[in-house]
Image: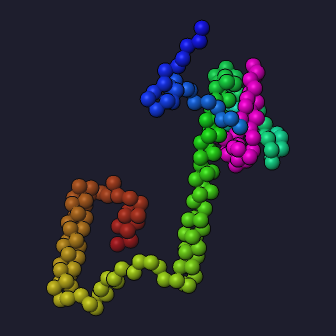
Amino acid sequence: MKTKKKTSKTGAKTSAPKKPAKPAAASWKLSDLEVSVSCDVKTEGLESIFGAAYLMMDKAFVSLSGDRAKKVDVVLRPKDPKSVEPRALAEEFLSDLASQKVRWAVAKNNLPIREFIAEQAVLIANGTIAPASAPAAPEPAAEELTDDQRAEIEKLISEVESEIKTMNEKKIALDPKGIKASWEEAQENKAS
């Protein structure tokens, strides 16, 4: 006896959500010691396959073979078979492959923007075009300071000099024999 599946009001069939499947363009074979993943270059992209294989090199020995234009076989052999199972390596490789595929797609889409930015930087460096933002106004030179500003600067300098002199006098009072003095300070004291 056949049973009908329930359909929603729109007529579409309802079903339980499925687990994310491995990419259709990649298939893998599992053995006790290694896993072999076969990737379609046209679907996955050669850069993505190489990038995912590179990311696996800390956990597994990676071997690539096949035709760069059609299909590449990636063999992953765990460096430490006791801690990493080949099945886990395959799943991680396929996850990295999906990430690399997105990464390279974004890079290809942003290529015109990166080229434009690099071109503008070269033109600005050569002086062909002026930078987009105007340079900040230069600070006034010492000749342009007002008399009040000059007086304030001289007052601050004299205060700092008196503080340094007071600190040096306290230092001599705390260490009259110069035991804590550095080698440079001891040489200065001998010369004076």
Residue visible at 75% across and 19% down?
32
Picture quadrant where residue 174 is located: bottom left
Asked whether residue 16 appears in the rendered view, the answer is no
Q: How far across and down, in percent of the image, does residue 163 sit?
A: 20, 68
Residue visible at 48% across and 83% down?
130
Q: Is residue 86 above or below residue 52?
A: above
In magenta segment, residue 167: no
Answer with left or right where residue 32 lies relative to residue 167: right
Residue range in magenta is 26-55
Asked whether residue 113 appears in the rendered view, the answer is yes
**Closest to the observer: 179 or 170?**
170
Q: Is residue 174 above or below residue 68?
A: below
Answer with left or right where residue 45 lies relative to residue 107: right
Residue visible at 38% across and 62% down?
186
Which quarter of the rendering shows the N terminus? top right
Q: How far across and down, in percent of the image, does residue 79 sit?
A: 71, 29
In magenta segment, residue 38: yes
Answer with left or right where residue 69 lies relative to residue 80: right
**Closest to the observer: 158 or 103?**
103
Q: How far across and down, in percent of the image, does residue 44 sit?
A: 69, 43
Residue visible at 18% across and 80% down?
152
Q: Is residue 1 above or below residue 122?
A: above
